[in-house]
């Protein structure tokens, strides 16, 4: 234990003289948005948002950007996307291939699993522009709570 304390005191002295990036201590509050610092006494009431039916995703984004991220998420677009269901894709392929069956089997002779659908995704380009895409076909039948959680989750990706 004494060796650890001695090592700590030596590292503090060296920090003052020539601090390398590995030895620098970062204050967590300098990284977190102000709204997430010292949240012991803070409570957010989202009960009104949870009651909404078909909430406007742009209003929710703007509200949560101010509430949780101090408006730091800029240059970001939020939009609905609709991807075709696998059944619809199979119908299109069947129509284009003169009714030939279009099933692929794996090594065991079983059908391959369908592609996993995600409720949302965050795309960022090299210039820093962000686009949050929300899957309408998946989210339209889910609760407002699920939609809100998805938006905030994607906003975290955008912020980081």
Image (spheres, rainbow, N blue to C red):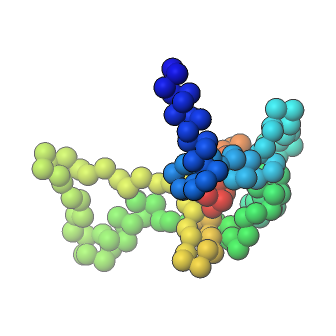
Instruction: Answer with left or right where residue 68 lies relative to residue 111.
Output: right
Q: Residue at x 22, y 63 (%)?
A: 101
Front residue of 94 and 73: 73
Is residue 6 visible to the viewer in this orientation of the structure? yes
From the image, which quarter does the C terminus lie in? bottom right
Is residue 52 visible to the viewer in this orientation of the structure? no
How many numbered marks does the figure carry? 0
Query: Measured along the vertical axis of the image, is residue 49 above or below residue 81?
Result: above
In percent of width and height, residue 90 lies at 35, 64
In percent of width and height, residue 141 lies at 63, 49
Front residue of 49 and 66: 66
Front residue of 123 and 2: 2
Q: Residue at x 81, y 51 (%)?
A: 34
Front residue of 45 and 15: 15
Instruction: Answer with left or right where residue 70 lies relative to residue 159.
Output: right
In percent of width and height, residue 87 lies at 40, 59
Query: Measured along the vertical axis of the image, is residue 91 above or below residue 48?
Result: below
Q: Residue at x 73, y 70 (%)?
A: 74
Q: Quadrant of residue 39?
A: top right
Q: Quadrant of residue 46?
A: top right
In percent of width and height, residue 104 lies at 21, 58
Instruction: Answer with left or right where residue 139 lies relative to residue 1.
Output: right
Q: Residue at x 71, y 43 (%)?
A: 145
Instruction: Answer with left or right where residue 137 lies relative to residue 50.
Output: left
């Amino acid at each position: 234990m004494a060796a650890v304390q001695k090592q700590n005191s030596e590292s503090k002295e060296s920090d003052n003289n020539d601090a390398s990036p590995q030895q620098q201590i970062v204050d967590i509050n300098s990284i977190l948005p102000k709204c997430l610092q010292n949240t012991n006494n803070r409570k957010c009431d989202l009960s009104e948002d949870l009651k909404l039916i078909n909430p406007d995703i742009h209003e929710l984004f703007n509200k949560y950007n101010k509430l949780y991220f101090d408006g730091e998420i800029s240059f970001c677009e939020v939009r609905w996307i609709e991807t075709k269901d696998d059944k619809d894709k199979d119908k299109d392929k069947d129509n284009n291939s003169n009714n030939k069956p279009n099933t692929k089997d794996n090594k065991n002779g079983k059908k391959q699993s369908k592609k996993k659908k995600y409720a949302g995704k965050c795309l960022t380009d090299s210039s820093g522009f962000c686009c949050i895409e929300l899957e309408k076909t998946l989210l339209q039948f889910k609760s407002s709570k699920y939609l809100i959680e998805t938006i905030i989750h994607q906003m975290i990706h955008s912020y980081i």
